[in-house]
């Protein structure tokens, strides 16, 4: 059963936003409801994301303008104009159609980090309307196999910047997947038996025939992304073409004030929703310049960071919170001033108020950090302090005042301040399906059909929303509910501590107990015992004695996903005694050695 929703506030709000895009066929239907909480946005509209991001800008005279700067892991800065991108996408589309018989119903996996190649490949898929999925380049055999099994691609395009390609793909090719084709984008001729294409060739060679771009139905599946793994098994989240794309432009405009003049540096991987929405589609849809950073860790070199900000005239800088915390711990008292920088943003994790303050001071800006709250499932930012908001009513740490049209609510007992965040009204960026099936899909919705975000939030006195972490990161101790984020932000106030993660483990007597994992600053000379004492004193003075942790472990690094999220579920398993549960899917873990070291520290303390 379908019904189109008309004439209410929701549709009239989004109807006004339709003109953000140029559409081949402007939609008349704004929102259509289907069974099972599926909703289609702009369902009779037709568009092409590649056209909106590249061809339209060329037609408007921006052909020679730099569209993408790309910083590789050797600190080299490469640049591409809109004309060059148009040419490279045409060439690649042509190659895919002729050599691999790729058609609009094919499926492609793109195995690449933030790079020129991932951008061109994503845009080629957008041009031809090919359902695709970008997966992290560091993923190894088993993780790739799992994603192939779920997504069932016809072709994998991998950017080869290391020699592990053989180890990753040869076995997959030899076994089971005879029909699956591989294309390696690389610079040197390959000794392996793979098809390969020189990436630089994409810019140089002459086109045989220009592939036509498709006029794509707004509700057609655009891409899928596997969630980062902070939530357990990878889920394939599917986004639509028109709704997702319009929402990315809407959020760029409203939260960052993005325009044609912007130069945007977003330190996120192409395998993350942020790497789609804010590194690529959002900025290019305005005809602005985007900077892709292959290895965001390069930005911890503050001299290099300063050089980039000044030379490339960055106006919007958007970093993961974990990177901001590291930057804080390495840069000491230094500050950076760039006259071009107008807006700074943060993503991925709660931004502790003192870290937010430090971040703004570091870049000499007296404005709120655009602390963006989003999920892979939401397509883009759900809420954030807006770029032009006022620090007095938007103190660092909150994610701002949500647009009323979302109907964001907290599900809670009336006596409690904190509750589970739900969104009552649909929005165009909302996922349209999950690949894993209806059982997973159904978990996202309340019985009234509202969207559950699985995060805990509360409102401050200015009606700004604060995020306290995922609902399974909430620690229920002696009847008190505290978010892991609240404990962490208190501990981060202690000098010499650069990173921290607070978790709860089950306890027979007390229901749950707090465990703290701490990373100290490189230059720290304080003894572990002294640091632990400071943590306990700080927690008691803030929460009271019920918050005394069962254990504090001082470790070298926290287990993080490639998108910079702390894998608290892994810490929970390691800290629980005895070690019964398997650790679970570790495919998105950045550094496997961190787990070995943590296990060692935990076991030594238990002895
Ligand atoms: P992912 O889908 O992997 O990007 O993870 C989404 C999750 O990251 C959310 O459900 C939150 O738990 C967390 N998150 C994202 N942005 C923020 C933020 N600004 N503050 C606190 N947590 C955040």
Image: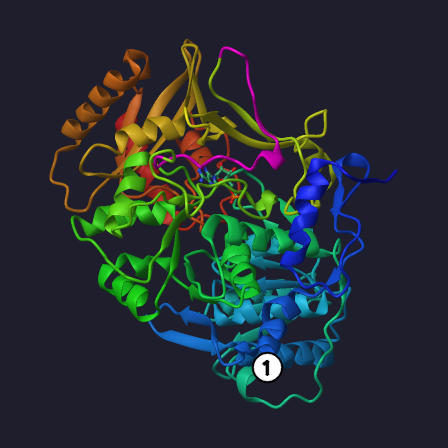
Is residue 198 visible in the rendered image? The answer is: no
**Taking 438 as reference, is 463 above or below it?**
above
Where does label 1 land, which residue?
87
Which residue is most to the right?
A: 1
**Taking 33 as reference, is 445 above or below it?**
above
Magenta stretch: dominant SS? loop
Q: Quadrant of the N terminus?
A: top right
The span picked out in magenta is 395-415
Q: Of 431 and 260, which appears nearest the observer?
A: 260
Q: Quadrant of the C terminus?
A: top left
**Magenta stretch containing residue 414, yes or no?**
yes
Position in image of residue 78 (x %, y %) = 41, 76
Image quadrant in which you'd find residue 530: top left
Position in image of residue 497 (x %, y %) = 22, 37
Q: Of 570 and 40, which appears nearest the observer?
A: 40
Looking at the rendered structure, the secondary structure element under dot 1 is helix
For the point 28% across and 13% down, the residue is 544
Whether the residue carrying mark 1 lies under 8 Å from ligand 1 is answered with no
For the point 31% across and 19% down, the residue is 550
For the point 25% across and 60% down, the residue is 301
Position in image of residue 427 (x %, y %) = 65, 42
**Magenta stretch containing residue 501, yes or no?**
no
């Amino acid at each position: 059963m379908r019904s189109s929703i008309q004439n209410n506030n929701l549709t009239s709000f989004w109807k006004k936003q339709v003109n953000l895009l140029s559409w081949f066929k402007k939609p008349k239907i704004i929102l259509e409801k289907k069974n099972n909480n599926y909703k289609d946005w702009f369902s009779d509209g037709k568009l092409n994301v590649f056209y909106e991001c590249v061809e339209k800008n060329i037609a408007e005279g921006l052909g020679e303008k730099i569209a993408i700067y790309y910083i590789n892991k050797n600190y080299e800065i490469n640049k591409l104009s809109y004309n060059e991108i148009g040419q490279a996408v045409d060439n690649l589309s042509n190659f895919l159609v002729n050599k691999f018989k790729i058609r609009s119903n094919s499926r492609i996996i793109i195995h690449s980090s933030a790079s020129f190649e991932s951008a061109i490949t994503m845009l080629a898929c957008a041009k031809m309307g090919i359902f695709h999925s970008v997966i992290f380049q560091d993923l190894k055999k088993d993780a790739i196999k799992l994603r192939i099994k779920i997504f069932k691609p016809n072709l994998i395009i991998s950017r080869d910047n290391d020699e592990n390609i053989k180890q990753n793909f040869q076995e997959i090719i030899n076994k089971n997947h005879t029909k699956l084709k591989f294309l390696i984008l690389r610079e040197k001729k390959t000794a392996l038996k793979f098809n390969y294409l020189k990436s630089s060739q994409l810019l140089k060679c002459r086109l045989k025939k220009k592939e036509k771009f498709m006029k794509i139905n707004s509700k057609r599946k655009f891409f899928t992304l596997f969630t980062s793994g902070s939530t357990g098994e990878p889920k394939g989240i599917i986004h639509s073409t028109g709704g997702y794309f319009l929402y990315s432009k809407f959020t760029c405009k409203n939260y960052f004030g993005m325009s044609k003049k912007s130069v945007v540096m977003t330190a996120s991987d192409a395998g993350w929703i942020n790497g789609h929405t804010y590194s690529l589609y959002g900025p290019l849809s305005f005809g602005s310049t985007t900077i892709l950073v292959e290895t965001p860790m390069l930005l911890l070199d503050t001299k290099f960071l300063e050089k980039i900000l000044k030379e490339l005239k960055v106006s919007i800088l958007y970093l993961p919170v974990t990177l901001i915390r590291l930057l804080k711990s390495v840069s000491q008292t230094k500050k950076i001033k760039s006259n071009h920088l107008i807006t700074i943003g943060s993503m991925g994790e709660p931004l502790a108020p003192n870290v937010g303050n430090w971040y703004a001071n570091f870049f000499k800006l007296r404005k709120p950090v655009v602390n963006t709250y989003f999920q892979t499932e939401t397509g883009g930012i759900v809420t954030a302090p807006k770029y032009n908001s006022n620090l007095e009513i938007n103190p660092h740490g909150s994610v701002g005042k949500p647009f009323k049209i979302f109907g964001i609510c907290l599900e809670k007992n009336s006596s409690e301040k904190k509750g589970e965040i739900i969104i009552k009204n649909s929005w165009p960026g909302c996922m349209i399906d999950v690949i894993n099936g209806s059982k997973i899909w159904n978990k996202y919705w309340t019985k009234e059909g509202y969207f559950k975000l699985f995060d805990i939030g509360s409102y401050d006195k200015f009606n700004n929303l604060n995020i306290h972490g995922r609902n399974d990161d909430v620690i229920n101790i002696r009847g008190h509910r505290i978010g892991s984020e609240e404990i962490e932000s208190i501990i981060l106030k202690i000098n010499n501590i650069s990173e921290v993660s607070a978790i709860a483990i089950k306890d027979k007597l007390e229901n749950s107990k707090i465990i703290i994992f701490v990373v100290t600053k490189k230059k720290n000379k304080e003894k572990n015992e002294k640091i632990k004492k400071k943590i306990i004193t700080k927690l008691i003075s803030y929460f009271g004695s019920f918050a005394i942790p069962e254990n504090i472990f001082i470790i070298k690094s926290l287990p993080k996903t490639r998108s910079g999220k702390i894998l608290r579920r892994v810490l929970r398993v390691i800290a629980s005694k005895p070690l019964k549960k398997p650790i679970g899917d570790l495919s998105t873990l950045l550094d496997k050695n961190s787990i070995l070291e943590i296990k060692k520290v935990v076991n030594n303390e238990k002895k």
